[in-house]
Image (cartoon, rainbow, N blue to C red):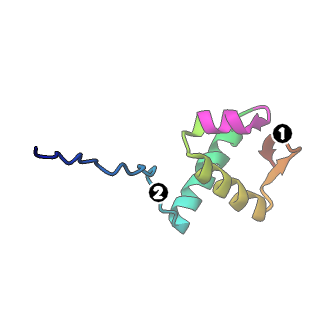
Amino acid sequence: MATTKKTTTKKTATKSPVEIITPDIVGTSAGKIWNTLNGSEEALTEKELLSLTKLSGQSLYLGLGWLAREGKLESDGKEFKLA
């Protein structure tokens, strides 16, 4: 009697695409955030900024950091506005 061998395929997890960040991308992100805040009469939350700028979370945080480093941003921990 012949034996049959079971074959299995190895499953690999797919990784989400990695966003390559360059100084130009950070500067562009900061510009989008600045323009959005400049056009708003009120401070905006992180969620609102993500929605309005269409930036990824990583790009949003890098852009916010850029603006904060330049002293152009104020935050109470919940909302952001231009200094």
Q: Can the viewer see residue 34? A: yes
The residue carrying mark 1 is 78
Occupied quadrant, residue 42: top right
Q: Can the viewer see residue 83? A: no
The residue carrying mark 2 is 18
Depicted 79 relative to depicted 31: above or below: above
Task: State the residue at coordinates (62%, 38%).
Answer: 50
Q: Residue furthest front?
A: 1
Locate residue 43, reporting x and y percent.
Answer: 79, 36
Q: Residue furthest right?
A: 76
Q: Is residue 56 left or right of residue 12?
A: right
Task: State the residue at coordinates (84%, 47%).
Answer: 75
Q: Amino acid at mark 2?
A: Val
* Mark 1 burial class by Cα count in 10 Å: few <14, some 14-19, many 20+: few
* Mark 2 burial class by Cα count in 10 Å: few <14, some 14-19, many 20+: few
Circle nearer the viewer, 2 or 1: 2
Q: Is residue 15 left or right of residue 2?
A: right
Locate residue 59, reporting x and y percent.
Answer: 59, 53
Calculate the distance from the C-alpha at mark 2 to the C-alpha at mark 1: 28 Å
Q: Earlier in the sequence, mark 2 or mark 1?
A: 2
Is residue 48 one of those drawn in magenta?
yes
Between residues 66 and 77, which one lies in front from this camera angle?
Answer: 77
Secondary structure beneath disc 1?
loop
Locate residue 18, reporting x and y percent.
Answer: 47, 57
Q: Amino acid at mark 1?
A: Lys
Is residue 16 one of those drawn in magenta?
no
Between residues 72 and 76, which one lies in front from this camera angle?
Answer: 76
Magenta region, residue range = 41-51
Locate residue 34, reporting x and y percent.
Answer: 67, 48
Q: Residue furthest left?
A: 1
Between residues 20 and 72, which one lies in front from this camera angle?
Answer: 20
